Image: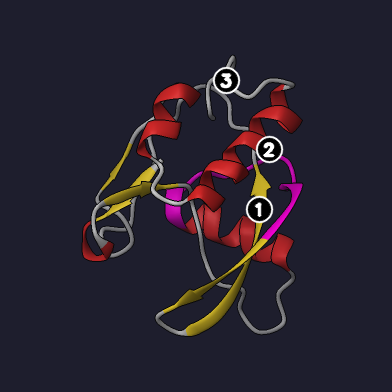
Amino acid sequence: MLTNKRRGEFWQPVTGTVEDGESFEQAALREATEETGFLFRDSPVDLNFEFRFRSSRGAAVEQCYAFLVDGEPTPKLDPVEHQDAQWTEPTEAFTRIKYPSNAEGLRRALRIMFGSPTNSKAK
């Protein structure tokens, strides 16, 4: 989970914007790499969850993806994007997530990746 001081210091998973010519999957991989510094060995897993919301830029659509990483590597954060990152157990992550859509994305990731909504670390 990551936090951003400029946007209200709330915890959230990696999020981002699709750039011109990118698919949602390509954007998910690029944003996850940019925001954590991790090099992922596998493609993102589509969680089949899409939601719409209104941002400061207007109407937006997000699609949710998940990645597996080995262990608990230390993210290399861009200080413009985020000020802190923590590995947490899912039960703790759910108490920190601000938006219901982000919580639903996490529930789906845990179910699809691990077969359980709370028994595996959110990595």
**Mark nearer the viewer, 1 or 3:** 3
Instruction: Say whether residue 40 is left or right of residue 53.
Output: right
Please state which amino acid type lies under the numbered disc 3. Thr
What residue is shown with label 3?
118
Q: What numbered label is drawn on residue 108?
A: 2
Q: Are marks 1 and 2 in contact (CB under 8 Å)?
A: yes
Q: Residues within 10 Å of mark 3 (few under 14, many from 20)?
A: some
Q: Where does the image place residue 70, in percent across and percent down from the top left?
A: 58, 25
What residue is shown with label 1?
64
Residue 76 visible, this angle: no
Residue shown at 30%/50% (left/top)? 10
Q: Are marks 3 and 2 in contact (CB under 8 Å)?
A: no
Residue shown at 65%/29% (left/top)? 110
Q: Where does the image place residue 64, in percent across and percent down from the top left?
A: 65, 53
Please state which amino acid type lies under the numbered disc 1. Cys
Residue shown at 53%/28% (left/top)? 122
Q: Where does the image place residue 76, in percent across and percent down from the top left?
A: 36, 46
Magenta span of residues: 35-50
Please state which amino acid type lies under the numbered disc 2. Arg
Q: Earlier in the sequence, mark 1 or mark 2?
A: 1
Looking at the rendered structure, the secondary structure element under dot 2 is helix
Instruction: Say whether residue 122 is left or right of residue 5.
Output: right
Q: Residues within 10 Å of mark 1 (few under 14, many from 20)?
A: many
Residue most toward the front?
100
**Colouring convention used in this rendered image of the protein:** secondary structure
Residue shown at 63%/24% (left/top)? 117
Quarter that holds the N terminus: top left
Task: Tell me how far mark 3 sits from mark 2, CA to CA.
Answer: 11 Å
Q: Earlier in the sequence, mark 3 or mark 2?
A: 2
Which image quarter: residue 115?
top right
